Amino acid sequence: MAKQRVGYFEDREDPEAQCSRCRLCELICAFHHHQVGNPRRANIKVIALGKGVDIPVVCLNCGDAPCMNICPTGALYRKERDGMVLVRSDVCIGCSMCVSVCPAGAITLDLVEGTAAKCDLCGGEPQCVAYCPAKVLRLTDAESVSGKRMRTFARSLVCQQEA
Amino acid sequence: MGIFQGGYTGKFLHVDLSDQSIQTKPLERDFALKYIGGRGFSARILYEGLRAGVDPLSPDNILVFATGPLSGTPLPSASRLIVAAKSPMTGGIGDASSGGYWAPELKYAGFDAIILKGRSATPVYLWVENGKAALRPAEHLWGKRIDETSKLLKEEIGDEDIHICAIGPGGENLVRYACIVTDEEGVGARTGMGAAMGSKNLKAVVVRGSLDVKIADPERFQGVIDAYRKTLEGEVWTETLRRLGTPNLVAHRQKLGIWGARNFQRATIDDWEKISGEVFREKYLVKAMGCMGCMVRCRRYSAILDGSANLLYMKGPEYETINALGAKPYIIDPAFILRAHYLCDEYGIDEHGAASAISMAMELYERGILKKAEVDGEELVFGNGEAFLRLIEKIVYRKGFGDLLAEGTRIMGERLHADYYAIHVKGSEVDASDPRSMVTRALTYSVATRGSCHLRGFPYIDEFIKPEEGLKYFGTAAVSDVKALEGKGKLVAWSEDWITVANLMGLCIFAWYRSRTFSMLIKRGLELVTEAYVAATGLPMTQETLLRCGERVYNKEKLFNWREGMGREADYPPPRFFDEAMPDGAGKGAHLDRGDYERLLDDYYTARGWDPVTGCPTPEKLEELGLDESGR
């Protein structure tokens, strides 16, 4: 099966099809994993860049995952079914090397457990995707991301010519 | 934290700005069960902590930042903050509500509420993080507008993720209707909470937290989240809010003819299509925003070109923005409305306060009561946007005529011997709509404890409640007739208690309480809220008890006002609504009838268990609510 992850798909032309910074993804993620209200224990985070730009950031599920490569204890491993990198909490020593090398900043040490925490796709049904009111978060794989990006890129070429 | 299994953090932060002392005190279980949170916390703290006659702008006033038990939980739209103090506008109970992210963050920082008293000798801000707090110097922030204040604080603390509740120059200069602004975007506008904060030399309260808000029964709580989500499916009102935000109401106000334009001399607007919800969406909307956890996303984020080809970004507009800055001064220009809106938010003043003051002055000028020399040489006629913008600056810095405008319409009326043209109740200006042709609106606005308010009850509930529902819940089918007086006292009293529950819980009225069917109001705003409270806190609660908590809090607020000398006479609409008929529109010719209104008020007091002569809660009512004779 293709390597899966949660992807962000916005449409800058549609005011409702963009991340609206409601942060329900953060809330629902932390609730699903820890049964509490606490966005700082979520594995997804909405980054507010100002001027109406808000981008949810979550594990990219890299093919050659730096977090997995650098882990000194083998606590990070790749799951067969959806290809997601997961954490064995009992093996993790909380050294935070994975945190240092993650290109997206999407792996953290859990504030309570002290061990590495990252998106696990909720076992195949990511709750952030299920609850996103703008429906801009989707379970996806690298191929569909590139397909979508190609379309956006192609459209931008046409728009430039028209302008 | 010991006694609570979830929802509450169980801690209050007490700050004395005079001696700079900071203490943490436990929230007691009985207090939580009787007053729940939000407006319940603030009503009790203010009633019991203040005595009658305290100057709202003196160090003796108490300023409360309160969350609810559901704030910070993953329940959608539990985002609202309550800021409360004795009101500089009304002299009675004051509170304002702001959405966004600040209230949940206070919970993550470990507190249910912050209670401040005294006055700092020099400007300070309060920094709160994970159970700890400190006062820090704010001289370098004093005088700064909201955006600049946030920028400097984020640099100083070195974190983009802090959450800030600040005042602008309006609050610093004690403009009576100054507001508080959370995260540059969410405005707690009414009743002058920014002035109360400014009088304490408190520039901002900055919070950051990473503590858990626990949930007593997660599985049950998940059930509430999903049940709530289901209620939004196919809900037309929700879809309208998402597409147009509250500006969707522009067309509705025009249709009903209840704008209150030109200081309530016009009921409709000639070119209303120029400022419709669709125009703001098509020309200025960047995107739909959501407050913390919101599935509805009525919040607007807009941009306009400023004079020098830069884009100005702002939250809003709301319908109220358009009513205040467009209809009242009759400046029917969307770009002007956004520019003025941006300025009011940046300076930290309530748009309705500022617009009402200037619109009243416009009427007085047109009537020759104010002369050109008295208004700093302005040609102060309705529609003069440039003069309006200049006066906003003068209000904020209390320069020239702005110094009087900054006092609000009630004081303007007294000083200029022109009370009749001050359109307020208890000192707070009428917002939202002209209630002259609708008795439920008129009563709701007039008896509201914080002064004229469309959010204290549900002023248009009679527009869609079915006769059989009226019979079942209020004992008469007549409540569904907007013209009928019968049953309206009970309807308004119930709506107030019910809406109060939202303010106790930290819930957003629009996301949770608004619907166009009465059965949905009950389902979402009572049944699911009760369920959420029980699941989050593990405390016992029923729908009846929760409504009773709303009633208790409303009575407490009434007692506060009563102690300040506000009796029956304070519960009347402005005389214009009796003396002048609606000049145009669907309600043309309508006005309130004095005899009818007396009967409405009697009916309301009777429904409330208040003495019809004085308007004060009776001893029997207090006993029923578990309060002693002094209301404690």
Image: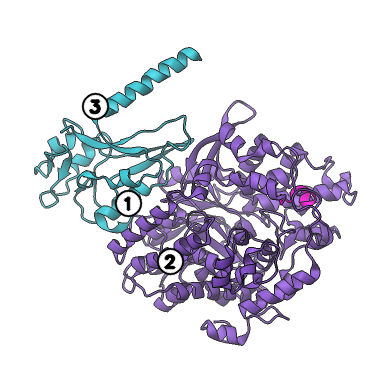
For the point 37% across and 40% down, which residue is it? A135
Instruction: Pick whichever of labels 1 and 3 is earlier in the sequence.
Output: 1
Check contact, mark 2 vs mark 1: CB within 8 A.
Answer: no
Which amino acid lies under the numbered mark 1 shown in the image of this protein?
Ile
- Whether residue B565 is visible here, answered yes or no, is no
Q: Report whether mark 2 lies on the same chain as mark 1.
A: no
Mark-to-mark CA distance, 2 and 1 = 22 Å
Which colour is chain A painted? Answer: cyan
Mark-to-mark CA distance, 1 and 3 = 27 Å
Residue B423 magenta-highlighted: no
Q: Nearer the viewer, residue B119 or B498?
A: B498
Q: Is residue A37 left or right of residue B205?
A: left
**Which residue ends up furthest to the top in the rendered image?**
A161
The chain assigned the colour purple in the figure is B
Q: Nearer the viewer, residue B589 or A159?
A: B589
Helix, strand or loop status at disc 1:
helix
Q: Quadrant of the C terminus of chain B?
A: bottom right
Q: Is residue A39 left or right of residue B391?
A: left
Q: How is the image coloured?
A: by chain
Determine whether B530 is above or below B227 in the image. Answer: below
For the point 57% across and 71% down, which residue is it? B471
Which amino acid lies under the numbered mark 2 shown in the image of this protein?
Glu
**Disc 3 marks which residue?**
A143
Q: Is residue B44 left or right of residue A54?
A: right
Residue B527 is marked as 2
**Disc 1 marks which residue?**
A28
